[in-house]
Amino acid sequence: MQKPPTHFTHLSTQVGLILWRLGAYFCAGYLAYRGVMRLLNLLLAVDIPTKIIVSLALSISGLLFIFASLILERIQDARNERSLRD
């Protein structure tokens, strides 16, 4: 007897979830960037190169969070698949 499929087995569902999550992370990163830039503009007279460095640092940290989230999700999925096979 075959095991019933899990909820997230279809490729289109997985791609949709990944795109939705990336969109949410992009929006959060953009809002964080705008907030930091507004704070820097209000508190300090910061020149353009510093803003570029800050925006690059925020982008890199956001990408690291995204990759860490995807890796952790894949590890959890692998554990779930192993438990379904047993």
Image: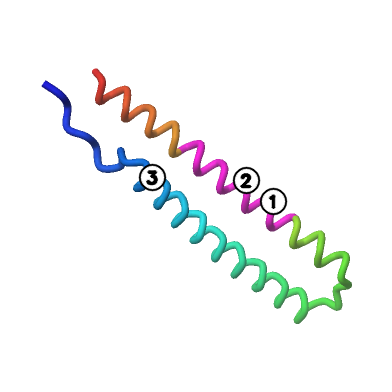
Sort mark 1 into few (<14), some (14-19) or many (20+) by Cα contacts within 10 Å: few
- Prevailing SS of the magenta stretch: helix
Other-residue count near label 2 (Cα within 10 Å), few / some / many at <14 / 14–19 / ≥20: few
Q: Nearer the viewer, residue 83 or 7?
A: 7
Taking the image as shown, residue 37 lies to the left or right of residue 29, namely right
Which numbered disc flags the more N-terminal residue, 2 or 3? 3
Chain part drawn in magenta = 57-72
Q: Hey, what amino acid is under mark 1?
A: Ile
Q: Which residue is drawn at 51% across and 36% down?
A: 71
Disc 1 and disc 2 in contact, CB within 8 angstroms: yes
Name the quadrant containing residue 27. bottom right
Q: Which residue is drawn at 55% across and 41% down?
A: 68
Q: Is residue 27 above or below residue 18?
A: below
Residue 82 - label: none
Earlier sequence position, callout 3 versus callout 1: 3
**Circle 3 residues within 10 Å: few <14, some 14–19, many ≥20:** few
> What is the distance, in whole Å, between disc 1 and disc 2 at their CAs?
6 Å
